[in-house]
Amino acid sequence: MTDDFLEKNLSKTNKKNRPLTGMQKFMFGMICWGVHTMSQVRSFETNGFDRKHLEAKKAIRIGMTVYAVLITIFVILAILFKKN
């Protein structure tokens, strides 16, 4: 509740340069799919948090890349170690 109140009362220049917290970056990377995540990123852009918007999009891209690499490695290992 307090964070919402503080963020609404920030000046425009302060809003533009406000970064994501470490936990927010981690969560955007771990939960990088879904409507809720994308709506949160769009709300950053709509409310004038330009830096948060860019950092959230970057964290989502990194999360998707990590998931894609892990799935690819899993499939390759499953094929290699498949017992006939």
Image (spheres, rainbow, N blue to C red):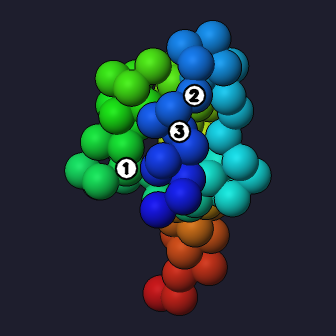
Find residue 22 and report its horizontal and vertical position in percent. Answer: 75, 52
Q: Which residue is mark 2?
A: 10
SS at mark 1?
Answer: helix
Q: Is residue 5 visible?
A: yes
Q: Position of residue 31 (x, y in %)?
A: 47, 59
Most extreme residue toward the right is 22
Comparing labels 1 and 3, the label whose residue is closer to the camera = 3
Which amino acid type corresponds to the residue marked 2 in the rendered image?
Leu
Instruction: Report crowding for label 3: few under 14, some 14 to 19, many 20 or more residues within 10 A (C-alpha).
Output: some
Q: Is residue 83 above or below residue 31?
A: below
Residue under numbered circle 3:
7
Please tell me the numbered disc located at residue 37: 1
Residue 50, position as x, y percentages in the image: 54, 18
User: Residues at badges 2 and 3 in contact (C-beta under 8 Å)?
Assistant: yes
Q: What residue is drawn where x is 37% and y is 49%? A: 37
Q: Amino acid at mark 1?
A: Thr
Residue 64 screen position, x and y as percent: 51, 45
Q: Secondary structure at mark 2?
A: loop
